[in-house]
Image: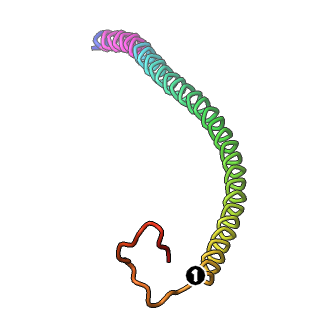
Amino acid sequence: MPPKRKDKETTDDNDELVSLKMVKVLMSQQESAFKSLLDSLIKSTIARVDGLVKEVADLKASLEYSQKDIAESGKSIKQNEKTIAAITVELTSTKTTLDKCHNKATYLENQSRRNNIRVIGIQKNPTKRGKNQRL
């Protein structure tokens, strides 16, 4: 039986050698799978970062455009405030003039009433008289 032992040990050694080769093959397959996984993760991360960079650039451009609009609106508001102030002054002046004209018209109307004469006893529709007759 000793020879069987040697054969068994030799077979075990061969099995161990085959299994070591198999381990190396499996390790290389695992390494390549891990590398491809890392490559795909890196590519997807790069794609996401590129998308974020593009979005940030778009937001920056939009912000600059919005800032220009806000600045123009601010200028327009200041100009409108000046125009409103001028119109307010003109309106106040016009109102003062209108009040003066109203007071003058009221005064003249009152003076006109004072100068009216009431005549009592004369008919409103006189009868026909000749051309030479006068009141």
Check residue 43 for magenta coloring. no
Q: Secondary structure beneath disc 1?
A: loop
Please identify the quarter of the rendering in which residue 108 is found: bottom right
Q: Residue furthest bottom?
A: 120
- Find residue 55 and report its horizontal and vertical position in percent: 53, 29
- Give whichever of 103, 73 is nearer the camera: 103
Classify 123 as above or below 54. Answer: below
Write the start and end of the magenta stretch as one range.
5-26
Find disc 1 in the rendering and name its residue: 116
- Find residue 133 and report its horizontal and vertical position in percent: 47, 72
4 horizontally vs 47: left or right:
left
- Find residue 16 and report its horizontal and vertical position in percent: 38, 15
- Find residue 82 and report its horizontal and vertical position in percent: 72, 50
Q: Residues within 10 Å of mark 1 (few under 14, many from 20)?
A: few
Q: How many marks?
A: 1
What kind of residue is marked 1? Asn
- Give whichever of 4, 53 is nearer the camera: 53
47 horizontally vs 22: left or right:
right
Classify 116 as above or below 121. Answer: above
Classify 17 as above or below 114. Answer: above
Q: Kindly report the secondary structure that dominates the magenta region of the rendered protein.
A: helix
Check residue 10 for magenta coloring. yes
Q: The N terminus appears in which quarter of the rendering? A: top left
- Give whichever of 10, 49 is nearer the camera: 49
Please identify the quarter of the rendering in which residue 122 is found: bottom left
**What colour-coding does the image apply?**
rainbow
Which residue is at a point 41% across and 69% down the rendered structure image? 130
- Give whichever of 130, 78 is nearer the camera: 130
